[in-house]
Image: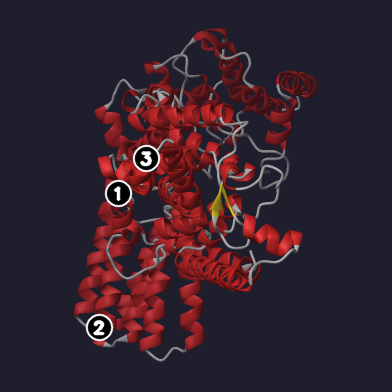
Amino acid sequence: MLAAWVACEAADVDRGVIRLAEPSAAAETDETPAPPDPLSDARRGFDADAFDARLEGLWFQRKALEREGRAADVERQAGLIRDFVGEEGVRRLEAPAGALLLEAAAWLREGNTPKALASLALAEALDPDRPQIPMLRARVYWNGGGGVIASAGELLRAGRLTVAAGLADKTLLNQGALAALAALGGAIVVTALFLVLRYQIVVRHDVEETLVRNGHHVVAKAAGWGVLLLPFVVWIGAGWAALYGLVLTFRYAKRAEKLLVAALLLATALVVPAFRLAVGLYGLGADPTLRTTIDAAGGAFDPDRVVKLRELVEAHPDDATYRFLLAGQYKKGRYFEEAFAEYRRVLETAPSTYQARINLGNIYFLLGQYGEAISHYRRALDLQPGSVLAYYDMYLAQSDSFKLKEAADSLARARELDPAEINRLLSEGTRDGGGPKVIDATIDTEALWNEREGHGPVWQGVAGDLLNALSLAAGLGLAACGFLAVSFRSRPGAIRCQRCGRPFCAACKSGRDTHDFCSQCVHLFVLGDGLAPETKSMKLYEIERHETRSRRLRSAASAVLPGAGHLLAGRPWIGTTLVFAWMLAWFVGAPAVLAPLVRAAGMDPAIGALQAGPVPALSGFSAAAILATPLGVAVWLAAHAGARRLRGA
């Protein structure tokens, strides 16, 4: 027991309650405050090692009883484990729950349904939100005759917990960001491919006509194909061919397609910096040290986090951040003595940490010692005069100690600083007895994210990442598109006849004719002056063949890749959006399927290697696959809902 505690006990023994002495003038300037006395609702002396030892003792007693076949005693021992963990306020014990999952799987293989369910019940008590537990219980119900409805209910619960876990630990978000970038790259390549398919005839026509007019009849056709396939002839790479295709078709594209090409080139310029940023954020999120700090900053009390944070404190004794988080964990578990000691050490290491002062005040507030609480809030304001949280917590302490005028002044000052924030704090939560509750100061998780291992702000260096070959090529592509738009503004490129698909340019028909039909189709459908019977028959056959081929090509493209038919039919934004969403569903749900195609396009994001699996590796759902499946179905239905309209396009 500390000496200050002994002195305070002697001073207050006649009142029957252990309380600290009121702060004196010297105490106001003393940076080493005395620890608070715990009341009946505060817990002391949490020892993670003792907790583990006690849990191991109960665990191995249960295993011994199980080997002896004493089922009733095994159930009682399981109850003791549940009660002990509940009394300690521990919500999640991953390792014992994983061992119980393996135990339940072993009982399932032996066909012992009751014992498998008992193991799963204890596992759920130790780790209630673990998705593998209802997943394995569904198998037990199915094999043990529990019924289809019970099995389906457990499967639905497993899916919900899987998605919730993926969102909580940020793995789903990180994987989704990487998959979105990969899908964007794939959508750019696919859009370029289908724009080239849509306009390759008119591109070749212009090249051939130019060479024919200059007397190069022999090489005209070969040159047309050569310009079209130039990236593959010189083998720049499939990814670069996409940029080339976007620029090549820009002159012939419709207005909506030109806007899309410009947007895709701009997106290409940003893909590499965004991908490097996403990979960096994923790596930081996967860092166990950072993961521990982020979880401790926002998570509930967990002995496992206490152990990990203690290790980090010992490894980084001069870093106040880890000790602050350790103190916060103790406070969440209502181990106020340990929390107070750690906050005091934070102030010894970093005296300017006003957040520690606020939380020390909150400990005194929870113990009903409002004078000491107000003293610490004032010290926090000396360090950070603009702290709305310090004013808010001091307002509550002053209100509860009936210093109403001072409380009104504190609240008014907080409203002057940030009225929106004070309104949020007032509505954030209530105490058991009603009324607002004090709010702890926390470490800025974004600052944690940025400062670990010398990592700067996440956006720092993005501009430098633009200096890469792909971004520079995309920038040159944008400049080339601008040059084409200006240079050929008065000289439109060749177009295809809307009826027969034959390409023609200004030199192929009279300047008086402004219709998007070739000369024969103008005479046949516009002027109505007729054609020779044989010519008319051939033309009608050509028109039917073109319409049939176009319809079949769009149908086949849409069947393989939803959205491709829209690109071929001249609906570029809808088509690219559908292609992106379809590829996103695959990259999120089954990235290994698209890996060969992505590598062939000159990219290798290695999304599949970034997927983490549960331990132990029992059968379970993938959160990414759960979300990707409805996305894929929705994209497929949306792409084919307008199939009838596309047939007539």
- Residue in view at x 52 percent, y 27 percent: 483
Horizontally, residue 470 falls left or right of residue 423, namely: left
Q: SS at mark 1?
A: loop
Q: SS at mark 2?
A: helix
Horizontally, residue 68 falls left or right of residue 358, namely: left
Q: Position of residue 130 (x, y in %)?
A: 41, 62
Query: Can I make out residue 612 in this image?
Result: no
Select label 2 or label 3 by which is in front. Answer: 3
The residue that mark 3 highlights is 216
- Which badge, 2 or 3, comes first in the chain's sequence? 2
What is the distance, in whole Å, between disc 2 and disc 1 at their CAs? 36 Å
Q: Amino acid at mark 3?
A: His
What is the distance, in whole Å, between disc 1 and disc 3 at their CAs? 48 Å
Q: Is residue 408 depicted above or below 577 in this figure?
A: above
- Do the numbered discs 2 and 1 sit on residues whose CB atoms are within 8 Å? no
Q: Amino acid at mark 1?
A: Ala
Q: SS at mark 3?
A: loop
- Residue in view at x 40 percent, y 67 percent: 621
Q: Is residue 416 depicted above or below 270 in this figure?
A: above
Q: Quadrant of the C terminus?
A: bottom right
- Which badge, 1 or 3, comes first in the chain's sequence? 3
Select label 2 or label 1 by which is in front. Answer: 1
Q: Amino acid at mark 2?
A: Arg
Nearest to the observer: residue 622 or residue 357 = 622
Q: Residue furthest front?
A: 532
Q: Which mark is residue 109?
A: 2
Q: Position of residue 528 (x, y in %)?
A: 75, 64
- Which badge, 2 or 1, comes first in the chain's sequence? 2
The residue that mark 1 highlights is 606
